[in-house]
Amino acid sequence: MPAPSPTRARRERQRRYRKGQRGEMLAALYLRLHGWRILARRYKTPCGEIDLIATRGKVIAFIEVKARKEKDAAAESIHRRNQQRVMQAAQIFLQHHPRYGQKMIRFDACLIPWYGWPYHIPDAFS
């Protein structure tokens, strides 16, 4: 099987990027409807990126968003490497935004199946 052409590979990357953006938009909308305030989307650090950072009451959540065909496939795609990246990036966020240091810190996941509602998993990394 021949290697994909650069144009085809670029289109595939763009398609995945747009799908990720749609998933994050749906997750943010879902969380807002459930009383969360979105502080940041795609927060970039030298360690990596946090998809969503949200707060509600005394909780600040660093949220990994995964959009897949099925909810189970999305859950399985959150590997230890993803978790470590988000935790390191969260430390950097908190260093730059000390006012959130008093909140309870949580690492959540939001799974976006192709058909159905987003599924928010509080404290998903433990």
Image: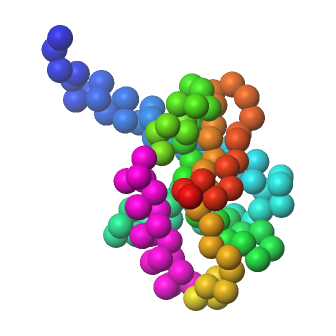
The answer to whether residue 15 is magenta is: no
Looking at the image, residue 33 sits to the left or right of residue 91; the answer is right
Q: Taking 124 as reference, is 102 above or below it?
A: below
Q: Position of residue 104 (x, y in %)?
A: 68, 76
What residue sits 56% from the left and 58% below the top?
126
Residue 125 figure quarter: bottom right
Q: Position of residue 87 (x, y in %)?
A: 47, 67
Q: Taking 102 as reference, is 36 above or below it?
A: above
What residue sits 50% from the left and 65% below the top?
43
Residue at the farthest left position: 2
User: Would you say the magenta stretch is mainly helix, strand or loop?
Assistant: helix
Residue 12 figure quarter: top left
Q: How many marks?
A: 0
Q: Quadrant of the N terminus?
A: top left
Residue at the farthest front position: 126
What residue sits 22% from the left and 29% below the top?
6
Residue at the farthest top position: 1
Numbered range of the magenta stretch: 79-97
The answer to whether residue 91 is magenta is: yes
What residue sits 61% from the left and 85% below the top?
101
Q: Taking 67 as reference, is 101 above or below it?
A: below
